[in-house]
Amino acid sequence: MVNVNEKMNTMIQNHLLTKPTSKRNRGHKLLQAFTPMGKISKCHTILLAAAAFAGILGLWTLLIAVVGIDPFFQPSPSATLAAAQTLLSDGEFIKGVQMTVFRVMTGFIIAAAIAVPLGLLIGTYAPASAILEYVFSFVRYLPASAFIPLFILWIGIDEPEKIAVIILGSLPQLVLMVATNVRNVPMSMIEVSYTLGTSKADVLWKIILPKSLPDIVDSLRTVLGWAWTYIIVAELVGASSGIGYMIIQSQRMMNTSRIFVGILTIGLIGMIIDIAFKLAHDHFFYWNKEMH
Amino acid sequence: MTAAGLDIQNVNKIYQSKSGNVFALDQINLQVKPKEFVSLLGTSGCGKSTLLRIICGLEDATNGAIYHKGKELHGPGPDRGMVFQAYTLFPWMTVSENIQFGLKQKHLGKKEAKEIAEHYIELVGLRGFEEQCPNFLSGGMKQRVAIARALANDPDILLLDEPFGALDMQTRGVMQELLLNVWQKSPKMIVMVTHDIDEAIFLADRVAIMSARPGRIKEILDINIERPRDYHVKTSQQFMEYKERATEIIREESMKLLQPKVVSA
């Protein structure tokens, strides 16, 4: 019996260790990837993603050249690139970008530091949910951007005001999302931990948090995206630095290509953050993939 | 009454719902001796899993009480290990860490915990998979880890809730033999819920057959098949006789459930 088991185990292990390594039929493999929920190689992913960006760039160029849109309304890729070069050589723009990143991250980290524990409590304990869930459902719908004039009145126009907008915009959303993540922890997993001697007080740290952590990190990633939209709104009103400030200044100078640079910079930063989150996810939460 | 074993006395369970009360368990009385293997056999909805959950302490009985070693049981505890049908392994831990989990709750030394885990990994035939994460294992292997995890904690009672229910027939057969093998090496009181008649008879010393709505223990079969048992037993004359008897009772119950109820105006 044991002998058979060992044989089986080595067989399965060998199977797990050997990866399919045929490098032939590359194109064929790409076609195969078009099955629903099919798998795709890293190389193909990068290739297709790059092609999508090239396509957008091509379409953009075509729009200007063929359709003949006034470059004042819609600057050409080359005009945008030139504007980017001037902005970058200035040094002021880089400082502005740093400022914006600093504001978003500060606001977001404060929001996360409060929202994750609150979400854990709401998702785990019914009384905590009764007390807080409806409050946050209510606050979640309060438009953060409408609070900007009030925040300026209450806090002033310095950094705390912008950070407050980020917190108001992201904290209530995050609280409710984390609570949902926590509720997805299977009850049987909690029950089995009781039968292994875990106390009710420890279940939160030993089972619920580690099990829901990958989902919580996903929620953080989503909400960080929203935080970026709030910071630009906050910087459009009453700021003296940052990407949003640069955009509103460019509007006054009718410099559309600079506005484009600002928007595209935000897109680029967002994409880098997303990729960083994805890589971190693959690295820390590799165990969360269902294989069978 | 066995002071050393498990003693279930007059346990009732009533669920209240909008459409009225559901009598899930009605006057359950059952005694299980230490190191005895008892199967709870019945059709789905007969309350066998509810009874197991009450023994485990995950649910309360509406009336009645359960005693173990003469003491009344309240709530779950490490004296009663449980293996569920659904995979409840902690996916962020390796196989070895999963098996050591209960030992760490007891604040056992690292070295000692590891040694115990090694022993059970060997026993369930998972050598070489210690550092794998559960999500990379097959269903049968996952349940082997779950059994090892429950056993490593050295509970007085092992409760099994259709542990092989999600496995294919062939794997299930292998797992049943593995469980018997493990149980013979380190005997423990086992109460196992199943709807598989063969499985119930093949493994147990006694099979408690339950009726549905309300859930009652209808008959207890003493399985006097010699141990150690292997799969050959399943084709023996003796086994067939037990199976016939159990099938008759279960069939009767299933038929009852299928008959349309007369609704009084």
Image (tube, coloured by chain):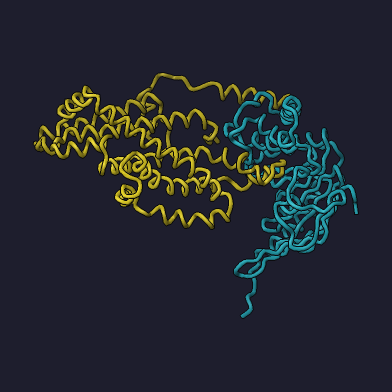
Chain colours: A yellow, B cyan
Most foreground residue, B155 or B250: B155
Is residue A150 visible from the viewing direction of this image?
A: yes
From the viewer's perspective, tell me whether residue A83 is left or right of residue B124.
Answer: left
Residue at the (52%, 47%) spot, across then down: A118
Compared with B262, A59 (above or below) is above
Compared with A71, A85 (above or below) is above
Q: Quadrant of the C terminus of chain B?
A: bottom right
Residue A171 is situated, as x and y percent measured from the top left of the image, at 43, 46
From the viewer's perspective, tell me whether residue A254 is left or right of residue B14.
Answer: left
From the viewer's perspective, tell me whether residue B66 is left or right of residue A101.
Answer: right
Residue B92 is situated, as x and y percent measured from the top left of the image, at 58, 34
Compared with A143, B213 (above or below) is below
Residue at the (59%, 21%) spot, across then down: A14
Most foreground residue, B220 or A55: A55
Residue at the (65%, 30%) spot, across then down: B95
Residue A174 is situated, as x and y percent measured from the top left of the image, at 45, 45
